[in-house]
Image (cartoon, helix red, strand yellow):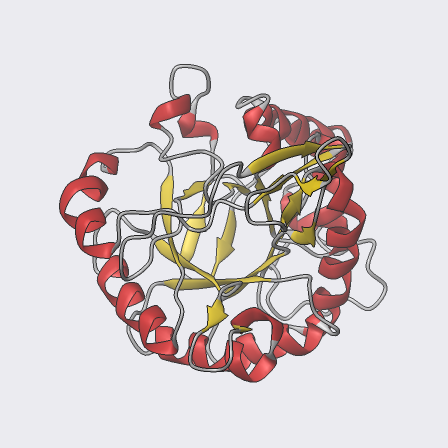
Amino acid sequence: MVNARPNLQTKLGALELAYPTLMGSGCYGSGEEFAAFADLSKLGAIVLKSVTRRARLGNPMPRIVHTPAGMLNAIGLQNPGIDWYLARELHKYAGRPCKLIGSVAGFSVDDYAYVCERLSARDEIAAVELNVSCPNVASEGETFGCHAHLTEQVVRAARSTTDKTLIVKLSPNVTDIVEVALAAQAAGADALAVINTVRGMAIDVETWRPRLGNLAGGLSGAAIRPIAVLAVYEVAQAVTIPIVGQGGIETFTDALEFFLAGASAISIGTANFTDPRIPERIVAELQEYLARRGLAGLEAIVGKANVGFSTPHQYEGDEG
């Protein structure tokens, strides 16, 4: 029997989303920039640009370089700082027809706790993403997200400041992403975003210099999708909290790979720069796919390609 309107609702902790599509931090603005081209009511949520305790000018130019099947970026967390952000910017985002997720970055455990507490207190913010791919200045510059014990400290500190859903964005630049995922879960994360960008470099063969002003940057786009799918697959076998799959999603079939690997939602980033309607199209094609197979909703496909998938956090109902 064909189900004409399969249910695409999903939950990330206490955060309920009408659609399983998140717009990656820094890749969709606040939504206003794309409102003339896309139906924001057909998005699950927009993850806002990361904000830090103090204002940051960001990295030297150039900051973005196109690469085969992807893009390198080294923006450097440019933002006006939490004080300005709360006083001058955030109120403009009220009334969006989709959920807004704040993104927190920092350079100490206290930074994360401070910014998370202030940001999550605002009604405009439905949940908070912790961008743990930042260096800890108190620990010889070690990146928080590359060490399980540092990730645990950040998440525990942020968790103590808010009851809103905490999503921890994991770095792929680690030896064992599962170890970091388990540390984040143990510290109180409600969901995990898997993965952030992969470190990379491009060199100008005429000038003999790196093409990014910061020398190296984060690689995103289709080039990293197989890395991201594997990471979701492995993390989904170990944790009992929902996963947001991300990394190179450009089409409906790309999204399906992440759901089948164990993701309960997806996040779209680089593809939005070329077509802001991609998220809406993925939702429509996902509903068509489920209806054609007679499936009641998203829960029928989450983790179905993952032979070791554990389902304590999954939905009750149709098992497909």
Question: Which residue is found at the position 47% from the left and 33% from the top?
Answer: 43
Can residue 320 be seen here? The reply is: no
In the displayed structure, 271 sits above or below 313; it is: above
> Residue 174: image x %, image y %?
70, 69
> Residue 184: image x %, image y %?
54, 75
> Residue 79: image x %, image y %?
33, 47
> Residue 58: image x %, image y %?
41, 48
Residue that extends furthest to the left in the rendered view of this protein: 87
In the displayed structure, 25 sits above or below 131; it is: above
In the displayed structure, 113 sits above or below 130; it is: below
Q: Say which quarter of the image contains residue 154.
A: bottom left
Q: Say which quarter of the image contains residue 93.
A: top left
Residue that extends furthest to the front in the rendered view of this protein: 207
Question: Which residue is found at the position 38% from the left and 77% from the top?
Answer: 109
Question: How many discs mark residues in the rendered view?
Answer: 0
In the picture, the quarter occupied by the N terminus is: top right
Q: Is residue 156 left or right of residue 278?
A: left
In the displayed structure, 64 sits above or below 162; it is: above
